[in-house]
Amino acid sequence: MASSHLKRLMLLRHAKAEWSEGVPDHERSLSSRGHLDAPLIGRWMADNALPDLILCSSALRARQTCTWVCKELGDKAPTPKLEDGLYAARPGEILALINQVPPTVTSLLVIAHLPGVQELAMRLASVESNEEAVVDLATDYPTAGLTVLQHPHEWAELDGRDAAVTDFVVRRASASRRG
């Protein structure tokens, strides 16, 4: 199938968050490193893979990551849709939200948490995937890690082993691993 017919799914783990005693997990904010790393992944997206729609966990650290990404996307950033169901979601729960995305969306960014994003990326990875990227994301899915997948299906049909992992991107303020 021609690449113009492919849909792109990007699974982003939120950037690094603080651990503060007495702060509920849902309200944890980004650490200073998270505030440095999140714009870098947004910059990568601005240069390589613009989303048409962003689904974002309602957790503070995910919302802050989304804000930084959107700032880097500038006027090309879509209005994010907050999804309470992405907070602490299992892979099947994330996929259920993805399956409801309108077919007019060709590039989707989902900002969520471990282990859901990593397990979903592994569940969807087809045999046509970039093997190095799959090994990297299976071994270590750090904060601000981004898996990029392509598939020829409608969102409602996406299920298992039917999306090719094209990239696994990790951007750090101090160093860059891949991408």
Image (cartoon, helix red, strand yellow):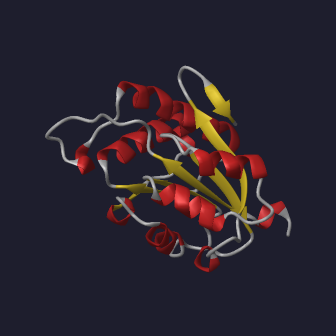
**Residue 129 location in percent, x, y?**
76, 58
Q: Position of residue 70 (x, y in %)?
A: 48, 41
Name the residue: 46% across, 56% down: 115
Q: In this view, does 110 lie to the left or right of 170?
A: left
Where's residue 106, x and y in %? 65, 63
Residue at horizontal 73 percent and vertical 66 percent from the top: 126
Q: Can residue 121 be seen in this view?
A: yes
Which residue is nearer to you in this view: 24 or 107?
A: 24
Is residue 54 visible in the rendered image? The answer is no
Residue ID at (57%, 44%): 140
Up the image or down, 154 lies above or below 2; here it is below
Q: Residue pushed farthest top?
A: 174
Q: Which of 114 and 28 is in front in this view?
A: 114
Compared across the picture, whether 142 is left or right of 157 comes to left
**Residue located 48% across and 75% down the image:** 96
What is the residue that sits farthest to the left in this orientation? Answer: 22
As drawn, which residue projects farthest toward the front?
A: 139
Coordinates of residue 7 in the picture (x, y in percent): 69, 64
